[in-house]
Amino acid sequence: MKKRNILILIVAVLVLAGVAVGIPLAKKWNQPLGESLQLPTLTPMEASSLTPEISPTGTQAMTEEDQPLAATSAPTEQPTDTPIPTATVEPLCGGPATMTVLALGVDSGGDADYLYGLADVINLVRIDFVTPKVTVMSLPRDLWVQIPGLAEHGVTEGKLNQSYFYGTRGMGYYDGPGGAPGLMARTMQENFGVNIDHYGTVNMVTFVKIVDAVGGVDVYLPYDVDGRPVDDKTEDMGYFYSGFNHMTGEAALRFSRIRKTDNVFARTNRQKTVICALKDKVLQPAVLPRIPEMIAAFQDSIVTDLSLAQMTQMACLLPKLSGENIIFGGIPEEELTQSRQWDARGGYETFVWDIDNQKVRDYIAQFQAGTFPVASEGAGCPPPVNSGQ
C-alpha cells in the first residue's frame, strides 16, 4: 500500500473514531483536550538568566552578537550580484515548524485518574515538521531543582519528579495552568530555561492499554535482561531472554521499568526499545483498523493539552520518519555524579544526581536548537523487528 493511501486511511479512521466516541469534531477538533500551559516564551538571553543558583552573567552568545556590528564598517565593496532567493520549505502535515512536548510517564500504581503520582519517565520531545525529525531528550528524575509557587505549603525545592507530585490534584497545592504537568513544565522552565509548547502524560494503566490496543510489540534483545528482585524491597519485573520477544502491554511495562539490576541509563535504553517497537507496530497496515480503539484510550486516559488536530498532524508525520531521524539521547552519564541531598520537607536524606545547573541548561539549549543529541550509531530507532512469524 502506498504511503499516500496509508495516510488517507489514517485520517479517515481518525475521523470515524472521533464520531464513535462522541466527539463533536466541528467544535472540538482544534481545542486542547486539557488545560493549556500558558507559559511565557523565553528568548535565549532570558533563558540564560533564570537559573536560581547562578547569577546572570555575560555569555558568549552576547559577545558574538556584538562582533558583526563592529565589523560592518570594514568592507569597502558591496556585492553587485542579485542574491538568489532560497526556497521556503513548508512544514509537513500542516504542523508548525517545530513543537516541543513534555512527555511524562507517571508511576501512580493502580490510580487511573491521575490523582497522585510521581513522574517516573521524563522526556522532552522536539518534533521537527520540516526535516522531518523527532528528537527525544531524557532527563533524570533525581535532579535536584527549585520548585516555584509552593512556598506557602513548605515546598521550595525537591527532585524533578516531585514537581509533578506536588502539582497533582490529590496534593491540592497547585491550581495553576496545566495541573501537575503544568507545574513540572514551569519548574523546568525556571530551572533550565526550556520552552515547552505542550504536555502529554501517560500512567501505567494507560501505557498497558495502548500497547495492547496495537496487539503488543515485538523487540529483539541481544542479551538476556534480568528483572527479578535483588532484595525484598524490589518488585519482580520478570526475566526476558535474548532473541525475539513479543510483549503484551503488561510485559512491555515490566521490561521498561527494570532498574535495580543495572542503572537508570540502561533503563532509559530499554524504554527507547519499547517506544521504537511501538512506532513500528503502529505503522503496520494491519494495525490501522485498531486506531479507533487507540483514540478512545487516548481520549479517556491521557492527560494532555494537545488537540485532536495536533495528534493527527503527529500521526501523519510518523510514516515520513526514517529510523535514523528518530533520535534518543540525554545528559551524558559521565556528567552526572551520585550524591545525597537533605529533603527539608520530608525530613530525610535522599539520593540525587549532581551536575552543574548551567551544563543542563546548555544541553537543553542545544536540544531546542535541534543540535543535540546528535544522530550517531545507536541513537536512532533500529530497523523493524522481523521474527519470521
Image (spheres, rainbow, N blue to C red):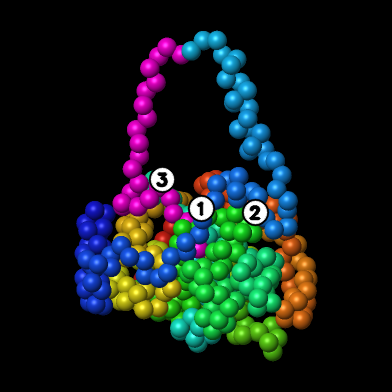
The amino acid type found where label 3 is placed reads Thr
The amino acid type found where label 1 is placed reads Thr
Q: Is mark 3 on a helix, strand or loop?
A: loop
The numbered mark at residue 131 is 3
Residue identified by numbered label 1 = 41
- Gap between marks 1 and 2, in whole Å? 13 Å
Name the chief secondary structure element in magenta.
loop
- Return the residue nearer the eye: 33 or 261: 33
User: 257 above or below 322?
Assistant: below
Q: Which quadrant of the structure image shows residue 172?
A: bottom right
Q: Which tag, 1 or 3, sits closer to the chain's start? A: 1
Seen at 49% across and 80% down, the residue is 114
Q: Can residue 256 be seen in this view?
A: no
User: 174 above or below 53?
Assistant: below
User: 119 above or below 39?
Assistant: below
Residue identified by numbered label 2 = 50
- Return the residue nearer the eye: 276 or 32: 32
Seen at 67% across and 65% down, the residue is 146
Seen at 64% across and 59% down, the residue is 191
